[in-house]
Image: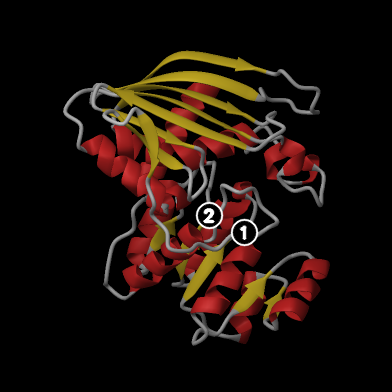
């Protein structure tokens, strides 16, 4: 994620001066060589060498609290990737307020045009809807260049299924209703992966709005899968997670019609077809606009705390 954010900022905000902080000497050398930016081995050394206005926190989620706290205490605005652990949120908010700086919470799917269109169509309905949503990808394929045991998705506290829920639930709650109760929940390990957490979940969600859904989340699907179906008397939508995969059933023609939202989009071949760069850039734009007083983020620390509390219930932690 750090390399992605770096690439997008360099390609779209060339007027900004960039530096990096990375504990690994090998990664510092790689970034300096390929991105021509100065890399430091600690935040304190970076701050001793220069002054900074903003920082992007792209470290493993379990480290976020300490990193964000140090940045805020040095009066630096923070963009943070998914935290997955909501410890210290009140403390971080207090420090940000005391030092007159901002925390921007990433939730990339809220910036996807397909999600925004789905939310628009769902909001237009006067009758309840139901949805079936399956998101899964084989864990060893997430980072094929390294073992899944060597990065955060291999750990129970910040596991792969938890990350999928943390990515998906913010838009689900925003679209179908933020007040939700959990119905049936099934947690199970169905693979031979070396994991100490369930690798598949089936969850039913009842939204106070009247909408309801089933989420199937796993790290077992050998083909990276995003399959959404929304059913209602006056709306029937399908989405396969790709920028060209949103379709609406035409009741009169009795056929599926594509909903076109992009003239073009940017895709990195290293990633599955449902991952495009456009939304990552859109939230970077939103972050910089927020700091310029030109807009507001689509997601907050408070909302993320509620999301992570809900995931805790799904995982049986509370």
Query: Which of the 4 image quarters holds residue 104?
Result: bottom left
Sooner in the amino-acid sequence: mark 2 or mark 1:
1
Query: Which of the 4 image quarters holds residue 304?
Result: top left
Residue holding disc 1? 1
Q: Nearer the viewer, residue 129 or 143?
A: 129
Q: How does the figure colour the protein chain or chains?
A: secondary structure
Locate residue 230, reporting x and y percent: 37, 28
Q: Which mark is residue 18?
A: none
| Residue 206 visible in the shown view | yes
Label 1 near label 2: C-beta < 8 Å?
A: yes
Residue holding disc 2? 81
Residue at disc 1, secondary structure: loop
Locate residue 68, reporting x and y percent: 52, 59
**Label 1 Cα crowd, 10 Å radius (few <14 / some 14-19 / many 20+):** few
Which residue is at the far front?
253
**Label 2 Cα crowd, 10 Å radius (few <14 / some 14-19 / many 20+):** many
Q: What distance separates the C-alpha of mark 2 from that of mark 1?
A: 8 Å
Locate residue 139, reporting x and y percent: 72, 37
Locate residue 43, reporting x and y percent: 62, 71
Residue 197 to residue 295: above or below: above
Q: Nearer the viewer, residue 225 or 199?
A: 225
Residue at disc 2, secondary structure: loop
């Amino acid at each position: 994620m750090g390399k992605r954010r770096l690439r997008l900022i360099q390609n779209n905000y060339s007027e900004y001066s960039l530096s990096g902080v990375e504990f690994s000497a090998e990664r510092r050398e790689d970034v300096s060589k390929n991105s021509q930016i100065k890399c430091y081995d600690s935040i304190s050394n970076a701050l001793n060498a220069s002054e900074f206005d903003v920082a992007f926190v792209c470290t493993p989620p379990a480290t976020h609290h300490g990193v964000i706290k140090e940045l805020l205490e040095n009066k630096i605005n923070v963009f943070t990737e998914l935290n997955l652990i909501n410890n210290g949120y009140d403390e971080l908010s207090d420090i940000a307020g005391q030092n007159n700086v901002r925390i921007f919470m990433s939730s990339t799917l809220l910036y996807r045009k397909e999600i925004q269109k789905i939310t628009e169509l769902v909001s237009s309905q006067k009758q309840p809807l139901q949805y079936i949503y399956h998101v899964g990808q084989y864990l060893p394929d997430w980072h094929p260049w390294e073992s899944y045991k060597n990065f955060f998705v291999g750990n129970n506290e910040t596991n792969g299924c938890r990350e999928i829920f943390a990515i998906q639930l913010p838009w689900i709650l925003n679209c179908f209703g933020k007040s939700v109760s959990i119905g049936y929940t099934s947690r199970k390990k169905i693979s031979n992966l070396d994991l100490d957490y369930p690798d598949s979940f089936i969850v039913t969600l009842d939204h106070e709005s009247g909408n309801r859904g089933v989420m199937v989340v796993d790290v077992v699907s050998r083909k990276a899968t995003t399959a959404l179906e929304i059913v209602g008397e006056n709306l029937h939508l399908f989405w396969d997670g790709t920028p060209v995969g949103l379709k609406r059933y035409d009741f009169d023609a009795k056929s599926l019609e594509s909903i076109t939202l992009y003239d073009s989009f940017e895709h990195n071949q290293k990633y599955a077809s449902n991952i495009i760069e456009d939304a990552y850039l859109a939230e970077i734009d939103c972050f910089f606009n927020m700091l310029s007083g030109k807009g507001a983020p689509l997601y907050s620390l408070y909302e993320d705390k509620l999301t992570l509390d809900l995931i805790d219930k799904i995982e049986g932690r509370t």
